[in-house]
Image (cartoon, grey):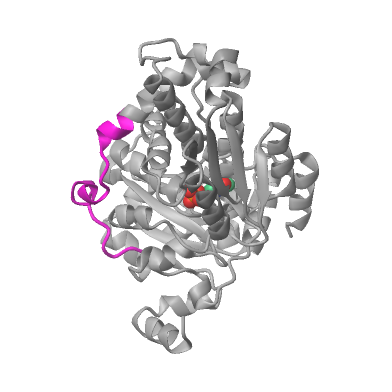
Amino acid sequence: MKNTDIQTLIAEYPLVKQLIDLEEVSWFNPSVTTLEAGLPYVGLNASDVKQAEQRLNRFAPYLCKAFPETQVTNGIIESQVVAIPAMQKTLEQRYGIDITGKILLKKDSHLPISGSIKARGGIYEVLTHAEKLAIQAGLLTESDDYSKLFSEEFKAFFGQYSIAVGSTGNLGMSIGIMSAKLGFSVSVHMSADAREWKKQKLRSHGVKVVEYEQDYGVAVEQGRKEAESDPNCFFIDDENSQTLFLGYAVAGQRLKAQFSEMKVVVDENHPLFVYLPCGVGGGPGGVAFGLKLAFGDHVHCIFAEPTHSPCMLLGVHTSLHDHISVQDIGIDNVTAADGLAVGRASGFVGRAMERLLDGYYTISDREMYDLLGLLNREEGIQLEPSALAGMPGPSRVMADAEYLKRMDLTPEKMSNSTHLVWATGGGMVPQAEMEKYLATAKI
Ligand SMILES: *Cc1c(COP(=O)(O)O)cnc(C)c1O
């Protein structure tokens, strides 16, 4: 963008100046609407999510066999919710603010198979594609026991097809591991931020890893190109895929069931706040969609991004969506939060979800590292930097009196509230890498 265009943008949206200055900012969306008013813009509905849930149920017997670590949950890939009371106290001290209500942590970091939130959408899209191919070939019907897919015969069948994806790391891990297990030939196009150990792990699963010195956007474009030249190759489009989005959305009803077992109440007087780290937007967008369907207007979803990669905040705030990137305004998109290192947001997710999201904020790399160290010290839970982005969320909400008043979130309601920090990754980080992360924390 020309400098004069940036100045014009800043004149209309002063917040953009703070983004350019890499300040930590919070923006609570003044035009957030009810589920009823916002839902038509999503273009997907509860029955689409239901179908995704049923598809994952059909695949559960297969996953049980292919990944024995999923046997404890009968082949359902789901994570635990835990309270983090010591961390809650530490956050209150650190930010100098009372956080009323209770902070819980959603441990997608410890999801089986790939150790990140991508085990939801990524795996779901691969399974959807495999099911379609097998049904079209007359090898499978929906009423079959899908454990039959765990066989040499099916591996040979899927071996005729290939899958390609572009990724900053975790999506590649999910798609790569799942596709290779089914028998697909799979290539993962990795951006410069992707960690070496993730590439090695994928290669050990027989995945073809293509490395780039550029960012995520370039890796995705190359993956797309490879797929275009081969009719048997399916490209998983992280920027626009509704299938991925629906895979993530299944989390909503699952969380509702977990909350009812834990006796966590969500209603008019017991609001739920959910803090979701955002990269391109599919993961947090899909989860937020599922949460909205499950809890209606009583859930308030807030996205968190690195100060160096605030693509969704920039796109939604200026209504330019995927027509603007952080690089356009001179931000480098270089962050330790590799899962969030995305310069241009998904146009689909921003446009679909903007009416249903309460807010967005940014967090510095320094802060993510320190929170990583604090969570380890206070709770013994180890996450990757991206997964800490949601942690300051409760303090940002508590600090914004205008937002709380506008949404009629009274002190009484806030004292009954639940703050759910979505921990999106880190469970498979090798110990030596984790030691480096922990050493970077200044606590
Ligand atoms: C991918 C990822 C996210 C964000 O998901 P998007 O779909 O890219 O927005 C958050 N945290 C981690 C650890 C991730 O890998």
Residue 306 against residue 329 in the figure, above or below: above
Is any part of residue 174 visible from this angle?
yes
Of residues 213 and 60, which is closer to you in this image?
213
Q: Is residue 285 magenta?
A: no
Q: Is residue 47 magenta?
A: yes
Residue at image location 27% in from the left, 48% down from the top? 42
Residue at image location 42% in from the left, 56% down from the top? 346
Residue at image location 38% in from the left, 59% down from the top? 359
Residue 28 against residue 380 in the figure, above or below: below
Q: Position of residue 409 (x, y in %)?
A: 31, 54
* Number of on-image labels: 0
User: Which quarter of the figure is the C terminus placed in?
Assistant: bottom right
Q: Position of residue 221 (x, y in %)?
A: 52, 56
Residue 396 against residue 116 in the figure, above or below: below
Q: Position of residue 104 (x, y in %)?
A: 50, 40
Q: In the image as oriented, which residue stretches furthest toward the bottom?
A: 4
Of residues 195 and 148, which is closer to you in this image?
148
Of residues 272 and 185, which is closer to you in this image?
185
Q: Position of residue 412 (x, y in %)?
A: 33, 49
Residue at image location 46% in from the left, 14% down from the top? 146
Image: magenta residue range: 27-50
Q: Is residue 398 left or right of residue 362?
A: left
Is any part of residue 270 visible from this angle?
no
